[in-house]
């Protein structure tokens, strides 16, 4: 099921519910309902065990909570693990600082521009040319020189147990063993590594240009087995891959050159057939996927309209089928062109009937996002998606429900249009018209 939302800042579990957060609103996913709700004052940047970092929208301040209480920071939180939080901090000089979750300092090191990985047993900081690996006391235990290639091909990859660094132009990767604090072996892959995933049985899933592979490293033995070959090799310059697992399957989500999308499911423990779901319309995969509160989630963005986002949701036992691309929307939706007082132009009239005002509002937002992408130009829209240059900027929206909307639901769609007008800078293409506030009608069906 696909659930649309304006922006995605974070996803977190709240008891048995899943919450998708944005600055304008949030979606709460419960057992039997998807509900659009008012945004909170902050969003979750990090949550693991008893630790949590939230960021306030208004000023960017951080609120860090752990087993011993909560404290506030205005520094830059980069990440962490159960035993530490990691920051970039500025005082007399710029530093990397690892802290206990109560705020006390573990260690400080001089700042340098770097990518990062924060594991349970080691921290890695580096770039295309060199990586530095630190233990959790702040001691640099290894320096690794890399091939220095551009970001996608030369990117390093990490699990809690193994770190992968590209050694040369022939797609040879050095493998750093975290437990032994040493490079213990290397592997040759096809093209490049795009993602790695630690599996529950201790093996590592490796995604390279030609397929999905399983890596086992034991003592002096290294075994790399291909589990699935892709029908076409992944383009090393235009492909992003996201991996995770739930209780029964591992998932590989691939955004191939922004046009083709692939989602694979691979059983963790048996010989069941690999599942595959592909699509090329409407939504592209972003870089966030995982498993929380009994739901697998994969974040998406509309191909053309920046900030029009969604999440694909499915249960641990749900097969990858075309139904995952369906929406939780109102059953009665009518869209037509509306007469305009501007010669040669037209508006759009949207009528939605539903028993739920909340679902009707989400349905209207999905339709508006599509129409804005097809009619408006501006920095938030890809001009290749514009197919209608006769739009006069006016939407007429009628929502028919047996119960009236609450204040948030009533204000949501006008605020949605304002967001894209002011922050997105959108206006009707091929016209001097402005994107107007929608003309709303709420009708009681009882």
Image (spheres, grey):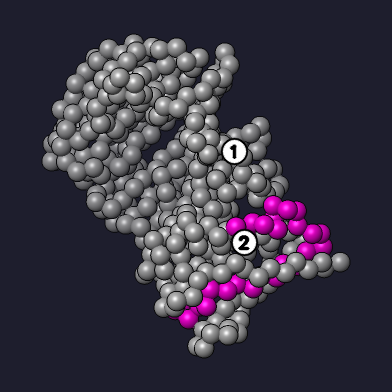
Nearer to us in this view, 171 or 429: 429
**Could you tell me which residue is drawn at 38 percent across and 18 percent down?**
98
**Could you tell me which residue is drawn at 66 percent across and 47 percent down?**
37
State yes or no: residue 354 in magenta: no
Q: How many other residues sit within 10 Å of disc 2, few (<14), some (14-19) or many (≥20)?
A: some
Image spot of residue 24 (x, y percent): 57, 49
Image spot of residue 339 (x, y percent): 60, 85
- Residue 408 to residue 153: above or below: below
Q: Which residues are magenta?
A: 387-415
**Could you tell me which residue is drawn at 44 percent across and 62 percent down?**
425
Residue 222 visible somewhere in the drawing:
no
- Assign a secondary structure to mark 1: loop
Quarter holding the C terminus is bottom right
Query: What residue is disc 1 on?
Result: 41
Residue 52 visible somewhere in the drawing:
yes
**Could you tell me which residue is drawn at 15 percent across and 27 percent down?**
145
Query: What residue is disc 2 on?
Result: 414
């Amino acid at each position: 099921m696909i659930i649309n939302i304006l922006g995605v800042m974070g996803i977190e579990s709240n008891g048995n519910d899943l919450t998708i957060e944005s600055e304008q609103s949030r979606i709460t996913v419960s057992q039997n309902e998807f509900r659009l709700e008012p945004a909170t004052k902050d969003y979750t940047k990090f949550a693991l065990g008893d630790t949590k970092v939230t960021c306030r929208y208004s000023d960017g301040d951080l609120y860090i909570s752990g087993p011993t209480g909560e404290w506030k920071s205005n520094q830059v939180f980069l990440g962490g693990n159960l035993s530490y939080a990691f920051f970039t901090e500025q005082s007399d000089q710029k530093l990397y600082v690892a802290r206990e979750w109560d705020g006390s300092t573990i260690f400080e090191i001089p700042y340098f521009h770097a990518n990062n990985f924060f594991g349970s047993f080691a921290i890695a900081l580096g770039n295309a040319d060199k990586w530095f690996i630190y233990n959790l006391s702040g001691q640099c235990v290894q320096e690794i020189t890399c091939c220095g290639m551009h970001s996608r091909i030369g990117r390093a990859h990490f699990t809690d147990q193994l770190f992968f660094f590209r050694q040369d132009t022939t797609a040879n990767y050095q493998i750093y063993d975290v437990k032994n604090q040493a490079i213990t072996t290397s592997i040759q892959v096809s093209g490049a590594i795009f993602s790695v995933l630690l599996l529950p049985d201790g093996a590592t899933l490796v995604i390279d240009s030609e397929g999905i592979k399983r890596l086992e490293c034991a003592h002096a033995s290294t075994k790399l087995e291909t589990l699935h070959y892709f029908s076409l090799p992944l383009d090393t310059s235009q492909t992003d891959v996201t991996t995770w697992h739930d209780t029964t399957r591992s998932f590989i989500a691939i955004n191939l050159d922004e046009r083709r999308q692939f989602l694979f499911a691979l059983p963790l423990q048996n010989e069941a057939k690999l599942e595959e779901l592909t699509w090329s319309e409407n939504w592209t995969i972003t870089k966030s996927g995982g498993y929380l509160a009994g739901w697998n989630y994969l974040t998406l963005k509309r191909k053309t309209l920046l900030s029009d986002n969604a999440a694909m949701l499915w249960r641990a036992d749900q097969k990858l089928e075309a139904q995952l691309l369906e929406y939780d929307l109102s059953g009665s939706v009518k869209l037509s062109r509306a007469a305009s007082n501007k010669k040669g132009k037209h508006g759009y009239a949207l009528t939605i009937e539903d028993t739920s005002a909340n679902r009707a509002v989400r349905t209207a937002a999905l339709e508006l996002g599509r129409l804005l992408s097809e009619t408006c130009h501006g920095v938030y829209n890809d001009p290749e998606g514009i197919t209608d240059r006769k739009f006069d900027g006016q939407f007429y929206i009628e929502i028919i429900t047996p119960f009236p909307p609450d204040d948030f639901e009533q204000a949501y769609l006008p605020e949605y249009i304002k967001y894209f007008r002011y922050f997105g800078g959108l206006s009707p293409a091929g016209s001097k018209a402005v994107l107007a506030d929608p003309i709303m009608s709420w009708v009681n069906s009882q």
